[in-house]
Amino acid sequence: MYLDKSIKEINNLLKNKTIKPIDLVLEAFDNIEKNKDLNAYITLNKEEAIKKAKELENKEVDNILFGLPIAIKDNIVTKDLKTTCASHILDNFIPIYDATVVEKINDKSMIIIGKTNMDEFAMGSSSRTSYFGAPKNPLNKEKISGGSSGGSATTIAAKDLLFALGTDTGGSIRQPASYTGIVGMKPTYGRVSRYGLVAFASSLDQIGPMTRNVYDNALLLNAIVGKDPKDLTSSSKETEDFTRLIGEDISNMKVAVPNYFMSDIVSDEVKDKIKETIKILENNGVSVDYIDMKYLDKAMILYQIIAMGEASSNLARYDGIRYGHPIDNPKDIEDLYFSTRAKGFGDEVKRRIMVGSYLLSGDNAKTYYNKALSIRDDIKKEFSKVFEKYDLIIGPTTTTTAYNLDEDMDDPLKSFMDDVLVIPVNMAGLPAISIPVGKASDNMPVGLHIIGNSFDEATIYKLASFIEKKVGEIYE
Amino acid sequence: MEDKLTKEEVLHVATLARVKLTDEEIEKYRVELKQLLNEVEKINDVEGYDKERMIAPWSDNTTLREDKSSDMLDPKEVIKNAPKHSGNYIEVPVVIGESEGA
Amino acid sequence: MSNYIPTIGVEVHVELKTNTKIFSPSVNGYGQMANSLTNVIDLGYPGTLPTLNEEVINLAIKACKVLNCKIRNKINFDRKNYFYPDNPKNYQITQFDTPIGYDGYVEIEVDGISKKIEIEEMHIEEDTCKSTHRNNKTLLDFNRAGVPLIEIVTKPCMSSSKEATLYLEKLKELLFYSDISDCKMEEGSMRADANVSIRKCESDPYGTKVEVKNIGSISNVGVAINKEIERQEKLYESGESFKEQTRRYDDKLGDTVLMRVKETGNDYRYFPEPDIPYVYITDEMISNVEKTIPMLPDERRSKYVELGVSPFKANKLVNNRILSDYFNTLLDSNINFDIASNLLLGDISGYLNKEEKVITDTTLTKERFIELVNNIDDNTLTSRNLKDILSKVLESNSSIKDIIEECGIKNITDDDKIRKVITNIINNNPDSVSDYKAGKDRAIKYLMGQVMKETKGSINPKMANKILIEELNK
């Protein structure tokens, strides 16, 4: 099977015409068909993908991602391809433009295979708030794949294909990556254009690559970054080759482990795996210090205020007027608003936009939202201080391994607590990756979280790829 | 501390968010929303922070767009996704007056 | 006479004269086919983000300068959240905490006394879409959605409808002259709302405030304010209290009509727009904009008067921006500006109105105009001559001298020749001479008439009049 080979091998096979893009596309669809019960996809793009693959047969293989199938999370808009955000309110929505990342993917001649399942409007941590039902964890179908980018994590972990895009507002790439044992990167806020990413919390959202290994991940990031004049929050930082430090010597690197990341909130089994990894690093010349950091335990509160506040405003546009799914025969305009949104949104979304509205109403905006923005600035400064002394910060991605799909969903705090370790990164806008570092006794993967300084993704990939290799050696 | 919101409090936020609730839902949210609000209340315990607000984590100077037109839609595309339209117009149930905003 | 003191504040929305919208590159235009000037950003499509039009910032800076506002050097935008079908995102991007301009003023003259109308703040925001109501449906046209606006808010510092209308006229003139806006109230590119309250004496707290919206012209602002003052007086006199409310002006009724009673504070849930980071207004940006500000109306008026134009005519010139701009090109030349202003406002304006043209459509270059003025000044041309040659002056490229020659105009400018004609007429009209000596003024008129008749108008009347009186007094 070609999609089991390394990216370089596939690229060579395409170049010497042993295979054609259509072979990869058909193989991916075969895999997805076999894994149908995982519910990784909301919409498949079969006809168009096959057409595109055939068109590519006449084109020169001009880059390493050429002709490769990719899955896109369903909150990234794709022209003429249904984009639902896993919500009833958009279940008939056909975008009339492409997201900037989609244009970039097309520029590389990658082939979009389908739109992946997720939590409704990316609100959740298990993808169970999807209007289309939750995806299942390929490593154990009783378990969640995490969320909100659960479908993208699922299809990569199931080895359907090599590449997927996810989005991360409060851990939504890294947490499912950890639960499914894949590699997921949230780039620095501003690295990747958000134009065409359906906003959940604008000041936190970021698109990132989800892949089987670190090298592929860096390659996909190479393809999607860059200043976008359509996104004022996108950075004018030079684009760079994120693979360039992979394989370089890591001895003498300095790594910090915040004590909070190894405190009682994390299960012993997860901690043990992280400690094993730390041992490997130390044995290879990396100095690892345990440090105290202010505000890490406050990040969750800030996240709730900022994310729910922004979401309540971002989701106001779904009223069934210009697009979307209104109720039939509204009595009047207010009925159109109230009933359309009551019917169109699920429970988690309703909860969050109601609380978000409250947090911004009257004087509350000052007490909550503005104060949260001020403290947020301090979190960023706190991280900056650490990066004056250390190259990277590490810890576990999640407090436990993936839990069961049938676990209670009604605790409104649960979905936030799943992300307690990954959220501080979004507050500071930093880049961070999750990579698998072995399995716990339940045979489910444990993820290592590596946080870098702003725009220093390359150093994250350097350490990540070293650990990936070492851990691989242990398990083989 | 009361561990539930009042019915009126729930209806108030539901109105701000424009979501119609059933009686059953109101009862459910009285508890659930209160749980969330108790959590965010904890921000009041944070002291000694800097007043500077971070609007977006990335702080490039905002690049302004040149005043040149591009990328317009055909009116047919405008109404393509609109559930109700009349000619080139998008249609809604009758609304009296203009909005507060401008 | 009324026993109450009115307090009036005015809020004005002005659409900026840009090529494109504030947050999207769609065309900013009026009167086009419905929904033909939009894109996915204006429609609030999922995933879209705003960009910020450079020219909007420049025009806002310009407005700050023209309205004497202080300029904030670090601004951000805020979201004003409310559900309404004309508000595509169900939030409006505006400025709440950091309006670009503040503490400005506009100077007006009320009954000969100058007064500063204080401007509280000026901010930038986007316009809503246009709704039309038909057969129990509301139809939405998004062409206007995202058109850039500035909102200019005065302090409650006016005490009569007259002050308010003078302020609006002045504001309109300033914004129009500096190319910030068309300021067409009939097309909605300028919209005024008035806040009106009354109280018994200065030391009382302000009375209940009523906002009057939807006023279609400046004169109607005056009418609406007066009607509102009257209405509030009646209510207070009859001991009735009323709630803070919004009313609209109904042109047909000539009166204000209740729109809604204000709820306890509208809950707009303002918060900083996360999609637009801080914008820094640098000194360089400000000085670049300052270079584009033309001479403003008040300066023009005083300059014209200084050069010998009457205040009345100076004002008339300034009221016609194209003529005034034309006049400004002459300011550094050494000519008789009184004659120049007479020509522009008199014969030339008459001709232009008839032909539905503006002066820049004609062949009258600065150089030819100066030649024309000088020919009149030295009596080579009389006003009667001018009427005959006006079309040639405005539509050919020949020099004025050539036109005069071509038309065979030969005016009697020789003092001796004129004196000869006049002595002849005096000798032939002894009765009139005695009438004159007896102090009867109309004798002069009669004699002048004879002089003009004799010379067929080819003589400068002023000069003839002077010589006639000299000869009569001999």
Image: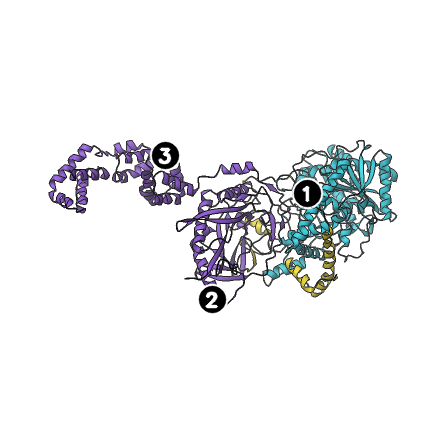
Give the amino acid at mark 2. Answer: Glu
Q: Secondary structure at mark 1?
A: loop
Residue of label 2: C237
Q: Chain of mark 2?
A: C
Q: Within 10 Å of the Cα at label 3, are there few (<14), some (14-19), or many (20+) other Cα atoms?
A: some
Task: Give how far apart the Cα atoms at labels 2 and 1 are.
Answer: 58 Å
The residue shown at (62%, 39%) is B61
Q: Chain of mark 3?
A: C
Q: Secondary structure at mark 3?
A: helix
Quadrant of the image occupied by residue A234: top right
Placement of the C terminus of chain A among the 4 image quadrants: top right
Residue C22, position as x, y percentages in the image: 55, 45
Out of A319 and C9, give the one closest to the viewer. C9
Give the amino acid at mark 3. Answer: Lys
Image depth: mark 3 or mark 2 in front: 2
Q: Chain of mark 1?
A: B
Residues marked 3 and 1 touching at CB (< 8 Å):
no
Residue C265, position as x, y percentages in the image: 59, 58
Out of A127 and A94, give the one closest to the viewer. A127
Q: How many marks?
A: 3
Give the amino acid at mark 1. Answer: Pro
- Residue B57 is labelled as 1
Q: Are marks 2 and 1 on the same chain?
A: no
**Direction bottom: furthest residue:** C238
Residue C24, position as x, y percentages in the image: 57, 44
Out of A267 and C377, give the one closest to the viewer. C377
Q: Within 10 Å of the Cα at label 1, are there few (<14), some (14-19), or many (20+) other Cα atoms?
A: many
Residue C196, position as x, y percentages in the image: 49, 58
Q: Which chain has been coloured yellow in this picture?
A: B
Look at chain C in the picture and name its colour: purple
Q: Is residue C60 left or right of residue C342?
A: right
Out of C50 and C260, give the one closest to the viewer. C260
